[in-house]
Image (cartoon, rainbow, N blue to C red):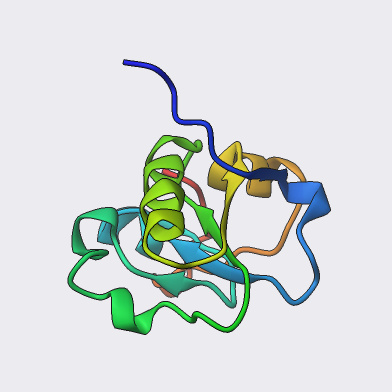
Amino acid sequence: MMPLQVPTVAVEELPEDAVLLDVREDDEWQAGHAPEALHIPLGDLTARLAEVPQDNEVYVICRSGGRSARATAYLNQNGWDATNVAGGMGAWAATGRTMVGEHDGVEPEVI
């Protein structure tokens, strides 16, 4: 299968006020995520489209970029202005961006 060609941005080039949509699974989200991100697992995206803001560009992130590329393509086909975040949360963590987790007393991590 050909890789999806979708608009892509490096973590370092994300706007400060970016609307970030995290499409990883619940366990991945709970382990560590961007503080302001919206969490909708990829499998739930079609059922929860109404939760995705349409008035701003949406930056889609997963662990490494594959699931978010699929979500970005889907959103763009359905009227959103979506951009994939290259390298996903792995790149987010590697560039030292802030992460929060859902487990008290446990350092946030990308799983």
Q: Is residue 23 visible?
A: no
Front-most of residues 62 and 72: 72
Residue 99 is left or right of residue 28, and the answer is right
Residue 34 is left or right of residue 39, and the answer is right
Q: Residue at x 28, y 55 (%)?
A: 42
Q: Residue at x 20, y 64 (%)?
A: 44
| Residue 49, horizontal then vertical, whole percent | 30, 74
Residue 13 is left or right of residue 80, and the answer is right
| Residue 88, horizontal then vertical, whole percent | 56, 44
Front-most of residues 62 and 33: 62
Q: Residue at x 65, y 40 (%)?
A: 91
Q: Residue at x 37, y 64 (%)?
A: 30
The C terminus: image quadrant: top left
Q: Quadrant of residue 104?
A: bottom left
The answer to whether 32 is drawn above or below residue 87 in the figure is below
The answer to whether 44 is drawn above or below residue 89 in the figure is below
| Residue 38, horizontal then vertical, whole percent | 46, 74
The N terminus: image quadrant: top left
Q: Is residue 29 visible?
A: yes
| Residue 99, horizontal then vertical, whole percent | 61, 63
